[in-house]
Amino acid sequence: MTLSDHEGVNAEQHHPTSQTSPNSQTSQTSPNSQKAAVTVIGLGPMGQAMTRTLLTTGHPVTVWNRTASRADGVVADGARRAATPGEAVEASDLVILSLTDYRAMYEILDDATASLAGRTLVNLSSDTPDRTREAAGWAAGHGATFLTGGVMVPAPMVGTEASHVYYSGPGPTMDRHLAALTPLGTPRYLGEDPGLAQLMYQAQLTVFLSTLSAMMQGTAMLGTAGVRAVETLPAMLGLVASIGDMLRGAEEELGAAMDAGEHPGDLSSVTMMGATADHIVETSTSLGLDTTLPRAVQAHYRRAIGDGHGGDGWTRVVDGIRSPR
């Protein structure tokens, strides 16, 4: 569950992340190390980055990947290669999964279920919250505990100060493995519901993927006038950054107003933003470009206007998203 490869929360509910609880237990350790042993299954770019980060911070790491050659680099760096998924699971109390989706977890671990009892599975793969909850039940049925995680940076940033990872699942399990998970990125614990970290990940990736597609839409629009992408992208990235600058400092006030059902339109009304959305659709159409994305945005504003909210602020479009028809 990552930005680089796919192998509604109250901040007061976040679990402590700076240190382990005084009563926390440690994972299985190597005789030659005080750091917890960790198994990593799935060695795409993210799995490899996590493995190297754990090795660098002194954790013994066992790895397994369906394409065995993908393990060569991290084995050369000090990881131990397991011959089978069962052997990989048995090597550590803490097993991190970095896979394409949850189906891959079942395919890999179905022959290793006898080894799961007493282990903790931390699945960092992308899927739906419902499938995540089902997976937590499946793990419990085999005697394992289950944490869901969402790594919110690309592989090269794993282990840096910018890295953070959302988790959900049993709090005591999070406590027990906090020291081993922290090197990957600042842990942000969301609560007991195993689907919550997945939902947070999907919500943030909605913004991420939509922004990237919007940048490509703008690049295509300017390209029809001969403006090269090398000139366009800096301007697009500057706009993305400016959105944060415009909202930063007001996000709590904005969120509180939305939670109260208030959408003041004194600065950016639905009608004004909707007119801009209409112009973008018209421009893209006249340029012969795909209009899927701009029409989706246009539909949000037309729905709000049709519901009589033209004078409200742009955040009013959330009502139509919440109650599609």
Image (cartoon, rainbow, N blue to C red):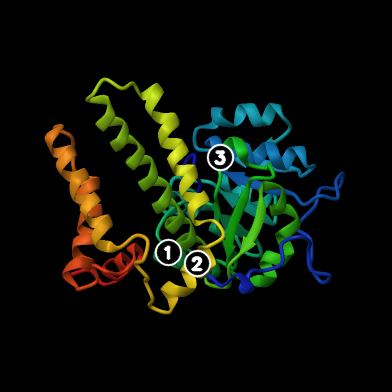
Q: Which quadrant would residue 69 be assigned to in this image?
A: top right
Tags 3 and 1 touching, CB below 8 Å: no
Label 2: which secondary element: helix
Q: Position of residue 1 (x, y in %)?
A: 49, 50
Label 1: which secondary element: helix
| Residue matched to label 3 | 46
Tags 2 and 1 touching, CB below 8 Å: yes
The quadrant of the rendering that contains the C terminus is bottom left
Q: Earlier in the sequence, mark 2 or mark 1?
A: 1
Label 3: which secondary element: helix
Residue at left offset 57%, top offset 42%: 84
Q: Is residue 317 above or below residue 60?
A: below
Q: Which quadrant would residue 57 be assigned to in this image?
A: top right
Q: Which mark is residue 129?
A: 1
Q: Position of residue 186 (x, y in %)?
A: 67, 53
Question: Which residue type carries mark 3?
Answer: Met
Q: CA distance from mark 2 to mark 1?
A: 7 Å
Q: Which mark is residue 196?
A: 2
Query: Is residue 179 visible in this depiction of the protein?
Result: yes
Q: Position of residue 247 (x, y in %)?
A: 49, 56
Viewer-nearest residue: 122 or 203: 203
Q: Earlier in the sequence, mark 3 or mark 1?
A: 3
Residue at left offset 53%, top offset 70%: 9
Q: Is residue 114 above or below residue 82?
A: below
Q: Is residue 160 left or right of residue 71?
A: right
Question: Which residue type carries mark 2?
Answer: Leu
